[in-house]
Amino acid sequence: MGYSSNPLLPKARADAVRLLVLERLPVAVAARKSGIHRTTLWRWKRKWLKLNEHVQLTNDNRPTRTAGAQFRLAACKWHVPTLSSRPLTSPNALAEWVVARITYWRRQAGRCAAIVHAHCLREGTQVSLASVKRVLRRLGFVTRPKYKRKYRAPVPRPVAVAPGSLVQTDTVHLVHPTTKQRVYLYTLVDVYSRWAYAEYHERISQQLSYEFLQRGQACFGRRFQCVQADNGSEFGYWLKLTLEAHGTTLRHSRVRRPNDNAFIERFNRTIQEECLRRRHPEPARIARQLLDYLAYYNEERLHSGIQYGTPLEMLQRC
């Protein structure tokens, strides 16, 4: 019989053993009434006897009910629990030092299993991606989704065939929890190389958006051919005409469809979690903080979308 985790099995074993012990039915009859084989019933009885070693039994291994006996029927444990199917030894289990390295990179990078696996391979730790996922799930670093998301067909986007061919931009609105003061973070990311750029401002406008894109293009070192943004007021018609006059196309995503700007939306989440730590930025430190993080993001941080390389490595290949 295969291993089963049915929670009603202990009670079923108890009912079968009661037929054999209390009602004193023959093994074949008790097994037939319980719907099991007689050898299975014998194994259940041996487990029951081991479970009740503290109880005084007669020679025929049945509980006595005499007044002089030290046995009480209520002291008998009847539910025979299901034993664990875990093997006593696991010769093919991962070594403890491999699990330690997986745990280290997970806590160091705070990234998904694929990134942790890439870090392990870079340092020489040979382990499969499936093993990394299994270890992270067992140690509680990741959990399975509670529900399946509804499938939505991907939205066609311009193909990014070279650096600068498609750049996505957006603004992150940051609200102070106490003063309710609103500040803004301009962000952009090159879809081909995942190179990113960001600036901090206390207001937004189309003029600021144009200046931000010009400074980002100067840092990038290549001309932006197509810029994709949402339908915010800072990416309006004036900005569209100004960019087209300089040879850059401005493309707007669909209304209430953030998946159209998936790359920049993911970068917005990353910079808030890893750079700002989900806190309101301090104006005196935010400029240096952004500069240090962008250097790390573009030169050191591994990206699963570009074969676990860095944006700088992608730009150097072109």
Image: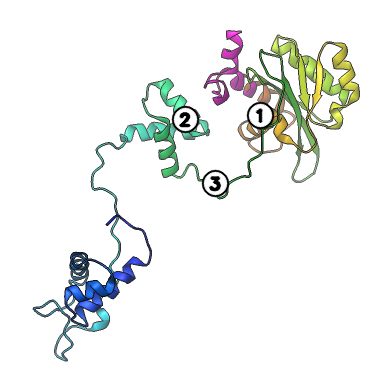
Kind of residue at disc 3:
Pro
Secondary structure under tag 2 reads helix
Residue 305 forms part of the magenta stretch: yes
Q: Is residue 212 left or right of residue 103?
A: right
Please say if the residues under marks 2 and 3 sit with CB atoms less than 8 Å apart.
no
User: x, y percentage for residue 139?
Assistant: 42, 43
Determine which quarter of the picture holds residue 291.
Answer: top right
Q: Looking at the image, is mark 3 or mark 1 earlier in the sequence?
A: 3
> Disc 2 and disc 1: Cα gap in Å?
19 Å
Task: Please state the extent of the stretch shown in magenta in the rendering.
Answer: 293-318
Provide the residue designation for mark 2.
116
Q: Looking at the image, is mark 2 or mark 1 earlier in the sequence?
A: 2
> Disc 3 and disc 1: Cα gap in Å?
22 Å
Residue 80 forms part of the magenta stretch: no
Secondary structure under tag 1 reads helix
Give the overall secondary structure of the magenta segment.
Answer: helix
253 up-or-down from 135: above or below: above
Provide the residue designation for mark 1.
267
Dot 1, how many residues are within 10 Å of its Cα: few (below 14), some (14-19), or many (20+)? some
Q: Is residue 22 left or right of residue 196?
A: left
User: x, y percentage for residue 23?
Assistant: 21, 83
Kind of residue at disc 1:
Phe
Secondary structure under tag 3 reads loop
